Image (spheres, rainbow, N blue to C red):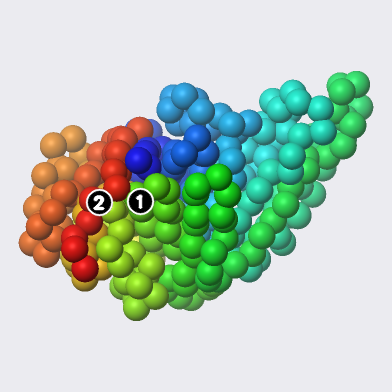
Amino acid sequence: MIEVTLLGTGSPIPDPDRAGPSTLIRAGGQTFLVDCGRGVQLRLAAAGSGANALTALLLTHLHSDHIADLGDLIITRWISTFTPDPAPFQIIGPPGTAEVVDATLAAFGRDIGYRIAHHADITAPPAIEVHEYTEGVVWDADGVRILAAPTDHRPVAPTIGFRVEHDGASVVLAGDTVPCDSLDELASGAGALVHTAIRHDLVDAMPLQRFRDICDYHSSVEQAADTAARAGVGILILTHYVPSPARGQYEDWRALAATVFDRQIELGDDLHRVQVHPGVCSAR
Ligand SMILES: [Zn+2]
Ligand SMILES: [Zn+2]
């Protein structure tokens, strides 16, 4: 079984009730954080996890809303790991990730110096290993395999989606993307697809062009559902909502998705949790 927790269902638009984009994946005793948007550590704590409990951080792309709390995550993991000589923090993302991590460490350089000066048992800066991929197997350890494939979020590039596989169960994390062949292939027959969803019908009616621009490179609810249908996934999990659904509006979103996808559809508040069991997919 793979457990999916929507830690942050928000977007770049500040929302008092939604953290920025981030999803927690638990599989086979391993814990993966996918993206680290605004407020991610508050939700990690609420989900019973923490920066020091993560097996690896996976980044779909380097848009600010998906990496907003990277610095907080790196520093908190560093100062809350008490084992001597801790293993490096594994960060997996598209090309450009190492540059962002290096710049983040530089931004926190003074803090890192203060803490090394203050604590006798902290003698080195945060140990981090960055792995950059656009496709292929990015993780294969202790029964969990993770694959990456390109998505289409242009002009943001490169961007990647992930497929997590464990003991016959599988979950695909699309991130921000318009429909594309490589995502269809990555998601083919998966137990669940976690996908960003934008209400094009509502956003297109906004009076600000900069707001309407959002539709250029994000799937609508119907497009995300169509990707799920084409790929034959068992469960569609929508997240990263624009605009943020008010209470009681989830059924409108679900109804839009259900026009093209006739299986299980999940959406909800931050910390919404979905269990994905082996065999939850169509026979393809
Ligand atoms: Zn994005
Ligand atoms: Zn985004």
Disc 2 Cβ-to-ligand 2 distance below 8 Å? no
Q: Residue 232, percent across and down?
A: 21, 64
The quadrant where residue 226 appears = bottom left
- Where is mark 2, residue-wise? 279
- Residue 20 % position (x, y): 44, 44
Identify the residue at the far bottom of this view: 181
Q: Quadrant of the N terminus?
A: top left
Residue 66 higher or lower than 226, as above or below: above
State yes or no: Cβ of the residue under disc 1 lies below 8 Å from any atom of ligand 2: no
Q: Secondary structure at mark 1?
A: loop
User: How packed is label 1: few (under 14 Cα within 10 Å), some, or many (20 or more)?
Assistant: few
Q: Secondary structure at mark 2?
A: loop
Residue 211 image point, x, y percent: 34, 62
From the image, tell me which residue sits under label 1: 168
* Quadrant where the image shows the C terminus: bottom left
| Rendered residue at 19%/63% (across/down) | 283
Q: Nearer the viewer, residue 202 or 36?
A: 36
- Residue at the spot 74% in from the left edge and 43% down from the top edge: 88
